[in-house]
Amino acid sequence: MVLILAKLMIPAAVLMVPTFVLIKGMGLYDSHLALILPMVAETFGIFLLRQYMLSLPKELEEAARLEGASDFYIFFTLILPLCRPALAVVAIHSVLVSWNAYIYPLILTSSDSMRTLPLGIAFYRASHAGVDAGHLMAGSMIASLPVILTFLVFQKQIIKGLTQGAVKG
């Protein structure tokens, strides 16, 4: 856990050059994996899920152990369903962070086919001198639709996760 917290304290700008060197050395530059791998080990999600799991009542796990349940069974039938609100928050956060990523896709890609939507909108604006604001707004609206839809799908879980600890029984 100390390593996870240490990773949270390191600014992303410090990790850009080592990430670029690592991706280039692995031969993944300008590929889908170059866009995915830096987002996989997101420390915020690990920290949030750990803290949420520590807040779950230990009595449920102990009762399942007394009944003879295995660790695998306890995790997948008791703990994971109780973590749905936290998993929804982590999913929303991960989608937002990766969908709005600008710097890492700029550094780790070079071809137009690998550019993400934020990069595409920025390159469109830079390449057209008298760009119409309507075109930029339409592109921005289209780019924001998946994030809005993701939030709408997970809305109940997020609200449940925010209010679950508010009232003690």
Image (cartoon, grey):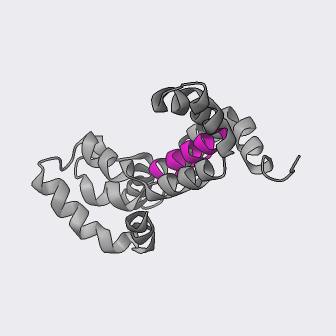
Q: What x and y, as percent, mark residue 103?
A: 37, 62
Query: In the image, 158: left or right of 122?
Result: right
Instruction: Name which residue lies at 51% across and 26% down.
Output: 73
Query: In the image, 110: left or right of 106?
Result: left
Query: In the image, 112: left or right of 133?
Result: left
Query: In the image, 40: left or right of 51?
Result: left
Can residue 134 be seen in the rendering of this structure? Answer: no
In this rendering, the answer to whether 156 lies above or below 48 is above
Residue 68 versus residue 118: which sits nearer the camera? Answer: 68
* Highlighted range, magenta: 82-98
**Going by the picture, which residue comes out furthest to the front?**
66
Can residue 48 be seen in the rendering of this structure? Answer: yes
Instruction: Name which residue lies at 22% across and 52% down.
Output: 110
Q: Is residue 91 magenta?
A: yes
Q: What x and y, as percent, mark residue 108?
A: 25, 55
Instruction: Name which residue lies at 56% across and 47% down.
Output: 90
Q: What x and y, as percent, mark residue 122?
A: 43, 57
Q: How many numbered marks appear?
A: 0
Instruction: Name which residue lies at 69% across and 45% down.
Output: 57
Q: What x and y, as percent, mark residue 96?
A: 54, 49
In this rendering, the answer to whether 140 lies above or below 104 is above
Q: Is residue 5 magenta?
A: no
Residue 40 versus residue 133: which sits nearer the camera? Answer: 40
Residue 94 versus residue 165: which sits nearer the camera? Answer: 165
The answer to which image quadrant residue 112 occupies is top left
